[in-house]
């Protein structure tokens, strides 16, 4: 069957559409899912780390929808959020199946509490549109995040886990667009008016304390040799990209003063910033109020 | 038992299903239909997503299942393949022509790429994208991200019309 227009395909048949919980949505059906010979709990934890990074930044970017400085940016940030959401669905599905306790992507996204999330703080901090940031800050965060993810995913393409390797190879092409988008805004604002320069610099200073965590290895990452990437290896590549963008933007690199950790712990250990609980309340509210809701 | 006629018919049916977001293209034109096999009336179809978050993927699976069941096959198993990752180079020549005729600028061919570092573009790449309406090359990018994640928005300086461009990936 084919349809004369896109809308015809949306009506008058049995499936529910365009949301989680459709009949077809087993995110990894048919994909090579062999589990490499490593500790399963470690592999599941690593997939959660990567899946949570993408999920939480996706949520933050989606908050801009209808609030960006121009319509094109509403659309751009929502599209970037959608790419990250897609990556996170695959990664959370993988985490759930490797864990083997029957949790699917929805259970992991909507039914975990704050201390069970493993994303880095950079993904969760307030960078606008609400208090604590603005559009310049959001682009500073997106630049740092996507430059770091590109370095990580480039290496993950040769991971011994076939799902991680496939998600990384695919996601890398999407992240290249995200990084370019953010980099071009950082240059435009940094090299713009006195006001845009001032706000871009403030945005960089807001996110810079969260760089250090990106390159601090967690024991799980170090135990998964051949599967995971040691984040300490990524620093020089990411620094090179950030320096190139800042130089083109006429902006100075902020001083590296890492954000404080709690007893040496941070996002990868489930220790989060104050803003995170509010984020989860918003993100999980519907699913927890109406379990299994479809729309 | 595999019947060759059956396989061809299942492939023919699957290849005619249209993309929900770019309905001028069939799934075969778009290059997302990766494999169709059939045995004793049971069909297995493998598709690949364009982008990781493509919301049309579930709809494609539902349309494939429904079309094949209506064509008389007894069961349909829709599977997903992630690797190798989809590229706009998989859109058929026919697909490029159909896009152009629908007023959407088709992607240019990227060709084989090396697995080296991802190049950083500090200005939008000055790719020459002709206007699908008047053919002028005097076009510029308005936004890298358009109405769907696979398209950017451009404008033609000669006929002054905005148009969408399926961006290369």
Image (cartoon, coloured by chain):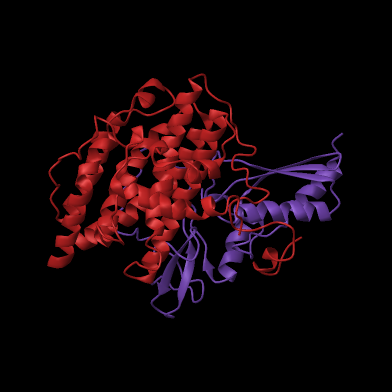
Chain drawn red in the picture: A
Taking the image as shown, residue A112 lies to the left or right of residue B96, namely left
Q: Is residue B154 above or below residue A49?
A: below
Q: From where the camera sits, is residue A191 visible?
A: no
Taking the image as shown, residue B25 lies to the left or right of residue B112, namely right
> Where's residue B40, x and y in %?
86, 39
Chain drawn purple in the picture: B
Q: Is residue A81 above or below residue B161?
A: above
> Where's residue A203, x and y in %?
21, 55
The residue depicted at 23 percent of the width and 46 percent of the height is A242
Q: From where the camera sits, is residue A74 visible?
A: yes
Q: Quadrant of residue A68?
A: bottom left
The residue depicted at 23 percent of the width and 37 percent of the height is A212
The residue depicted at 64 percent of the width and 64 percent of the height is B23
Which residue is situated farthest in the front direction here?
A289
Which quadrant does the N terminus of chain B fall into? top right
> Where's residue A80, x and y in %?
42, 55
The front one of A42 and B18 is: A42
The residue depicted at 35 percent of the width and 34 percent of the height is A268
Taking the image as shown, residue A256 lies to the left or right of residue B105, namely left
Taking the image as shown, residue B91 lies to the left or right of residue A206, namely right
Q: Quadrant of residue A267?
A: top left
* Total count of labels: 0
Q: Quadrant of residue A136?
A: bottom left
The front one of A144 and A95 is: A95
> Where's residue B91, x and y in %?
58, 54
């Amino acid at each position: 069957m084919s349809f004369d227009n896109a809308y015809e395909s949306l009506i008058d048949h049995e499936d529910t559409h365009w949301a989680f919980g459709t009949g077809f949505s087993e995110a990894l059906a048919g994909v090579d899912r062999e589990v490499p010979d490593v500790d399963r709990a470690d592999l599941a934890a690593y997939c959660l780390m990567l899946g949570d990074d993408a999920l939480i930044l996706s949520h933050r970017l989606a908050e801009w929808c209808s609030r960006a400085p121009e319509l094109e940016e509403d659309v751009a940030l929502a599209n970037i959020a959608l790419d990250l959401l897609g990556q996170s669905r695959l990664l959370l599905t993988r985490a759930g199946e490797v864990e083997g306790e029957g949790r699917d992507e929805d259970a992991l996204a909507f039914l975990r509490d704050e201390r069970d999330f493993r994303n880095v703080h950079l993904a969760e901090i307030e960078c606008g549109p609400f208090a604590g940031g603005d559009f310049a800050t959001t682009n500073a965060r997106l630049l740092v995040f996507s430059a770091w993810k590109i370095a990580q995913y480039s290496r993950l393409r040769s991971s011994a886990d076939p799902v991680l390797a496939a998600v990384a190879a695919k996601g890398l092409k999407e992240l290249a667009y995200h990084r370019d988008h953010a980099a071009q805004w950082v240059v435009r604002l940094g090299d713009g008016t006195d006001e845009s320069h001032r706000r871009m610099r403030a945005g960089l200073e807001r996110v810079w304390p969260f760089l250090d965590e990106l390159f601090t290895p967690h024991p799980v990452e170090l135990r998964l040799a051949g599967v995971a990437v040691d984040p300490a290896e990524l620093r020089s590549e990411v620094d090179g990209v950030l320096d190139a963008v800042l130089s083109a933007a006429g902006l100075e690199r902020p001083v590296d003063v890492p954000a404080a950790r709690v007893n040496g712990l941070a996002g990868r250990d489930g220790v989060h910033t104050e803003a995170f609980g509010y984020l989860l309340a918003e993100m999980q509210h519907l699913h927890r109020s109406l379990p299994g809701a479809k729309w | 038992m595999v019947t060759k006629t059956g396989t061809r018919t299942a492939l023919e049916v699957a290849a005619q299903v249209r993309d929900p977001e770019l309905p001028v293209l069939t799934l075969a034109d778009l290059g997302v239909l990766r494999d169709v096999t059939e045995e004793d009336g049971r069909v297995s179809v493998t598709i690949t997503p364009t982008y990781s978050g493509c919301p049309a993927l579930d709809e494609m699976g539902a349309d494939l299942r429904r079309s094949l069941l209506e064509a008389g096959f007894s069961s349909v198993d829709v599977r997903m393949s992630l690797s190798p990752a989809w590229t706009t180079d998989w859109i058929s020549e026919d697909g490029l022509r159909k896009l152009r005729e629908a007023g959407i600028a088709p992607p240019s061919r990227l060709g084989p790429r090396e697995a080296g570092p991802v190049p950083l573009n500090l200005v939008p790449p000055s790719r020459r994208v002709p206007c699908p309406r008047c053919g002028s090359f005097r076009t510029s990018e308005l936004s890298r991200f358009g109405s769907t994640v696979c398209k950017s928005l451009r404008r033609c300086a000669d006929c002054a019309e905005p148009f969408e461009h399926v961006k290369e990936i």
